[in-house]
Amino acid sequence: MATSGKVSKTPPEHPDTPVGAAPAPVASQIPMPNELDIQDNLHRVEKWKTWKQIWTNYSIITNLATQTHEHQLALFLQTTGPDSLKIYNSFSYGIGEDCSLLDIVIGKFDAHFIGETNETYERYRFNKCFQES
């Protein structure tokens, strides 16, 4: 059996993908983050921080930044769940704050769950610490 000497390369599934490289994952195959569980008041801050990190990874993997602001916000609110939606509905926005921007809304959630740091009190606590020798 004679061969022509030519190596047949099958084209990649995606034209922008180099031959031999794995194609990028399809956004529809990436599972959405689970709802944010805020029922446990003792661990709300930790749960929010962990959930936010999962959300950030999800938004990067799915290339969410290319979507409209309305789409980004709707997906975020759908993912957080009904309890978080109640919190979102309680937010007030100042002049110049665009309530359709996801970064602004996430900042509001940060302020809600984490709160603001009282620097004077934290400085006092730090200065009251004793170093053991």
Image (cartoon, rainbow, N blue to C red):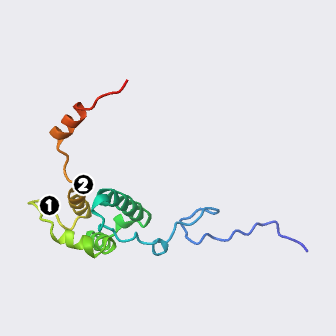
Q: Quadrant of residue 122?
A: top left
> What mark, if any, has residue 114 been given in the picture?
2
Q: From the image, tell me which residue sits under label 1.
A: 97
x, y percent for residue 7: 76, 66
User: Where in the figure is residue 124, as x and y percent of width and height?
Assistant: 18, 35
41 relative to 13 in the view: left or right: left
Percent from the top left, x then y, of residue 99?
18, 66
Furthest-right residue in this view: 1
Query: Could you tell me the amino acid type at mark 1?
Result: Glu
> What's the residue type where badge 2 is placed?
Ile
Crowd around label 2: few <14 · some 14–19 · many ≥20 (10 Å): some
Badge 1 density bin: few <14, some 14–19, many ≥20, Cα 10 Å: few
The quadrant of the image that shows the C terminus is: top left
Q: Mark 2: which secondary structure?
A: loop
Q: Nearer the viewer, residue 88 or 101?
A: 88
Give me the residue at 20% from left, 53% from top.
Answer: 115
Q: Identify which residue is drawn at 28% across, 74% down.
A: 74
Side of 86 where 132 appears, left or right: right
Mark 2 touching mark 1, by CB under 8 A? Answer: no
Q: Earlier in the sequence, mark 2 or mark 1?
A: 1
Res. 70 in view: no
The relative height of residue 124 versus residue 53 in the rendered view (above or below) is above
